[in-house]
Image (spheres, rainbow, N blue to C red):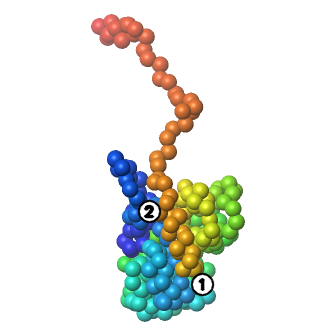
Amino acid sequence: MSKLADKIRKVSRLEAQPMGFVTARTTADATMVLIGMARDARAATDMARRGADAVVIGSAGSAANADDAKQVEGAVAGAWLDGRSDGASKSCKDGGYDFVLFDPDKTASTAVLEEGIGYVISVPNDVSDNELRAIEGFSLDALYVGEIKGAMTVRKQMELRRMFGLARKPLMASIPADLSQSELQALRDTNVIVVATDSAEGVDKLRKLIDALPPRSRRKEDPERPIAMVPRSAPGAGEEDDDDDD
């Protein structure tokens, strides 16, 4: 398991709330993973210092340098993968990267064969239901759904739930740093467990928002939901059955 996958697993857990007085919440209580999208190792280090749980170095059009991961301290390092050559993921692993982010339209199947490194797939906007079902069979840490712009509408929530429901993988999205806490919580409740920003200032703002989110809660049954009642046997019915057996 990659370190990124481990972080996702930890923030996804539903934990019992402590009893008594709690003075403050810490980042250990966070319920989302924060990723900084950095152009190089220097920017990644700054984002890690400001509270990013992980960083992704490079971009879809410019893959990360193989040795940049070794210069990052304080956060899990991932890389945009140049998947045109065989063994590209192995080169990233050897360079110290924990996971890679890749474009399925540009990545050769022979580039992502390495074990012991995490994979995040960048899904196209027009991904079909059949493709999402096929993704379920891949060993992936998360699905990167790209940038979420504008207000979180119910229609957008439906689309995100469709992706999660068919692929059964945690969702990752780039979001604006000026999102409100309620909008961020709505994203979390739509299975967007990993959020990303491409600026150090964005990391500052989102770190505070994430740490202030309320804990996850289990959904309770709707009290107005009809409950099926199983009728009990009439008194004496069991005795009549006994008489028949005699």
Seen at 44% across and 62% down, the residue is: 30
Residue indicated by mark 1:
60
Q: Quadrant of the N terminus?
A: bottom left
Q: Residue 239, image x and y in percent?
A: 34, 8
Seen at 34% across and 47% down, the residue is: 20
Q: Residue 4, image x and y in percent?
A: 42, 72
Inspect the image, locate mark 2, and give the three-letter code of the amino acid beneath it. Answer: Ala
Judged left or right of residue 190, residue 215 is left
Q: Nearer the viewer, residue 188 or 166?
A: 188
Please report contact status of discs 1 and 2: CB closer than 8 Å, yes or no.
Answer: no
Judged left or right of residue 177, residue 109 is left
Q: Quadrant of the C terminus?
A: top left
Identify the element where label 2 is drawn. Answer: loop
Q: Nearer the viewer, residue 33 or 214?
A: 214
> Which corner quadrant of the image does residue 167 belong to?
bottom right
Seen at 36% across and 49% down, the residue is: 21
Q: Nearer the viewer, residue 117 or 136?
A: 117
Residue indicated by mark 2:
30
Number of the front mark, 1 or 2: 2
Number of other residues with Cα within 10 Å of mark 2, as a class: few under 14, some 14 to 19, many 20 or more: many
Identify the element where label 1 is drawn. Answer: loop
The answer, for residue 65, to whether it is visible in the render is yes
Q: Residue 221, image x and y in percent?
A: 51, 38
